Amino acid sequence: MDFEPSIVSSEWNQVLDFLENQFNKRPADVDSVLFLIGVQELGKGHATFTKEQKQDLMHIATCKVLSFSGFYTLEGLDAEGWPHWNLVQAVPQMPLKEQEILIKAHIIQYFKSEVFNLEQA
């Protein structure tokens, strides 16, 4: 996984281009992309979600993408089919800009391995 800001920026734009082509709308921010990943990981298709469920979907997505670096492992699904994750190691404290690069790099890895099937995690 590459954390070089210029590479992350370029590949991030490729992910946004892909999503824009899929949905005819470009995601506004990282949270929008995390929400879409959460919906995908939940696997229940299009639905109307409460505000709390939307936050839960973004949490699911964050855990999923950070699992590529071993920060989280999947515990399993609850009775309603929602995934639950265990924190394996804390994400290191870092400045906001570096946090953004970290999460974008992991989202890019998600798309490469889970959507585009270009690389294995």
Image: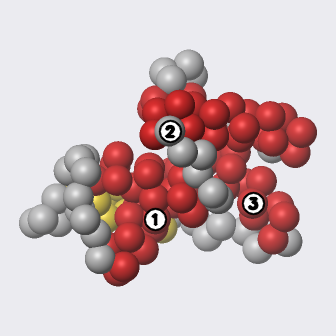
Q: Amino acid at mark 1?
A: Met
Residue that mark 3 sits on: 100
Q: Quadrant of the N terminus?
A: top right
Residue that mark 2 sits on: 24
Q: CA distance from mark 1 to mark 3?
A: 15 Å
User: Which dot, 2 or 3, sits closer to the camera?
Assistant: 2
Horizontal and vertical percent for residue 99?
75, 64
In contact (CB < 8 Å): disc 1 and disc 3: no
Horizontal and vertical percent for residue 3?
81, 44
Which residue lies at the image location 42% right of the left edge and 74% below the top edge? 55
Which residue lies at the image location 23% right of the left edge and 58% below the top edge? 47
Q: Amino acid at mark 3?
A: Glu
Residue that mark 1 sits on: 58
Mark 2 surroundings: few (<14), some (14-19) or many (≥20) residues within 10 A:
few
- Upstream in sequence: badge 1 or badge 2: 2
Q: CA distance from mark 1 to mark 2?
A: 21 Å
* 120 and 14: which is toward the camera: 14
Horizontal and vertical percent for residue 117?
48, 21
Task: Describe residue 53's horizontal placement relative to residue 91 as left or right.
Answer: left
Element type at mark 3: helix
Residue 5 quadrant: top right
Element type at mark 1: helix
Mark 1 surroundings: few (<14), some (14-19) or many (≥20) residues within 10 A:
many
Which residue lies at the image location 76% right of the left edge and 73% below the top edge? 93
Which residue lies at the image location 77% right of the left edge and 53% below the top edge? 101
Relative to 104, residue 56 above or below: below
